[in-house]
Image: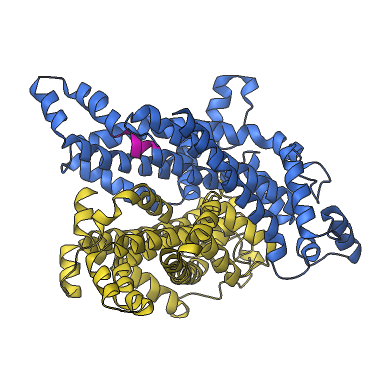
Chain colours: A blue, B yellow
Amino acid sequence: MLAYVVRRILATVPVMAIVALFVFSLLYIAPGDPAAVIAGDQATPQDIERIRATLGLDRPFLVRFGEWVWNILHADFGTSIFTGLPVTQLIAQRIEPTFSLMIVTLIFAIVVAVPIGVLAAWKAGTVIDRAFMAFAVFGFSVPVFVVGYVLAYIFALQLEWLPVQGYTPISAGIWPWMKNLILPAAALGFIYIALIARITRTAMLEVLQQDYIKTARAKGLGEGRILFLHALKNAAVPIVTVIGIGVALLIGGAVVTESVFAIPGLGRLTIDAILRRDYPVIQGLVLLFSFVYVLINLMVDLAYIVLDPRIRY
Amino acid sequence: MTDIINHEGVAIAPQLPDILPPVKRRTGLAALLRHHPTVLVGGAILVLLVLMAIIAPLLFTVDPTALAPARRLRSPSAEYWFGSDMLGRDIYSRVVYGARVSLVVGISVAAFASLAGLFIGLIAGFVRIADGVIMRFMDGLMSIPPILLAIALMALTRASVGNVILAITIAEIPRVSRLVRSVVLSLREQAYVDAAITSGTRTPQIILRHILPNTLAPMTVQATYICASAMITEAILSFIGAGTPPTIPSWGNIMAEGRALWQVKPAIVFFPAAFLSLTVLAVNLVGDGLRDALDPRFAKRL
């Protein structure tokens, strides 16, 4: 088992290496002079020269890539072209709101979606099940910012239960922090809930047909015990897999959600970086988010060992 | 969104041989629509939306880019059906014309990503030496969240509809390639492919006769989900200012322009939002119906 854990952890290294190589070389694959690409249309020759110096374009590609990776391994993501500040510092300033939003959404989505999926599978073929399936298709179709605006309109503008936008750091207290996160998390979690609930339903339908469920019913176990202890535990592997894969949706969605709810997080930083063509910042953000994504899916893989003792690689 | 289906495709990949479509007798379009009403409903909405996009100039619209600063921020009325924005442009006309961008991007990305994915997937499935290299590279690309990848690509290029299509296509390719490759790998194990190989059929012939036709069903379903996902991604890119140039009305652009004022004039945001959601819903309905129709065994499971 330890060998598997070590092998699985080592397997993330080449994946991250490819991500890094891709993110780094994108700038050079794009047509035209990289410095001019970054500088944009209204750049003066001085601007382009300054950017050329920042990027160190006079040295060979592999040397630059090697240096860049070396610096990243030492938590140095380079310097923002627009602000002149280290990318690491810019990211550190903005990381709390984004990670708060993502973690709250993740927990909220799992707590809501799994029981819905279990219920739909238990009542398969009934009105409840059909209503849920309709909700799932709906959930996949309504983009995250649309959900965000609708929720904000109803609960913030009309009912005035929650703030329309903004963010309060967690250091100001749990409730003020939470109050600002409820609507964004609900908006961001919408598609994620549809995704997790649907895979839960599918996995549960499969498990509920197994003989040991019949046995459990025959020996008179309560339905709740059967569903949540016996069935759900055996349906866990695909559910956990989809939770891990769905984090990509959370990351992409967080950028937009922050924009709708005016949350000063990494999404805001991403948008500013695009508008200013601040490519070092974009590189840092893509790398960071990909790393989080790979890390979460690594944890999912390791969770298999706990969830299904039969899995031994 | 395609991601979901793709991801589920990945999640269920080990069982893929099991869910491969059985040889199907040809059934007519009418039968398909009768047995799968979601295709009918989704298809009907889509036809209407495509018509709307094509005959936009005839639908009582005015020039969607015409400025009228004196008449800005009007509420919906007989003159301005959906109201006017902060530059006095008619939102109804902008929303109707905006359908063009969404549909063109959705359909183009679905077509290009399918073709590229088919090509890469076939190579990976047939050329053993290339397989490892290609799939490791795709694994890397797949660990970049697709929207973020599209954002990074857009940051390097000029804002244009063509570049939006290119960026989203590149972000979608890894998942399609993976799907095609897994279909190819399981088909190669089939007895009739073995038989074709032993009887001396050359590889191109095998691909053309035996492999390609069998990838069509899963690819069609996949293409509809790519189309839905691409339309959402386009709207997101435009919404955050990294997509379709502001001079072209697209649903994402209209929402981006309405963002600053949405608390006062929610209509500017809600009309394009409703059309975008309806369009994506219609595509997803067609996709779900096709999935059930083309793959009866899978339909029972879901």
Q: Classify residue A74 by image quadrant.
A: top right
Name the residue rendered at 68%, 36% in the picture: A94
Name which residue lies at 56% across and 76% down.
Answer: B63
Left or right position of A192 against B299: right
Dominant SS of magenta comes to: helix
Looking at the picture, how far across and down is residue A229, in whole percent?
26, 23
Residue A3 vs B2, above or below: the answer is: above
The percent position of residue A50, horizontal first and vertical second, equals: 89, 57
Residue A125: percent from the left, percent from the top?
16, 44
Q: Nearer the viewer, residue B179 or A60?
A: A60
Q: In the image shown, does B78 or B139 lie closer to the viewer?
A: B139
In this view, the residue farthest toward the left is A218
Q: Which quarter of the rendering shows the N terminus of chain B?
A: bottom left
State which quadrant residue A116 falls in: top left
Residue B208's place in the image compared with B270, above or below, is below
Q: Is residue A69 on the magenta stretch?
A: no
> Can residue A297 be spotted in the picture?
yes
In the depicted view, which residue is nearer to us: B35 or B195? Answer: B195
A220 lies left or right of A101: left
Instruction: Name the spot of residue B196 as percent of width and height, x first.
Output: 26, 74
Q: Is residue A182 visible?
A: no
| Span colored in magenta | A235-240
Residue B232 lies, with reference to residue A33, above or below; the image says above
Mark count: 0
Residue nearer the viewer, B171 or A118:
B171
Q: Is residue A127 left or right of residue B149?
A: left
> Which residue is drawn at the image coordinates 59% and 66% (left, top)?
B244
Q: Residue at x 82, y 66 (%)?
A: A42
Asked if B146 appears above or below B62 in the picture, the reply is above
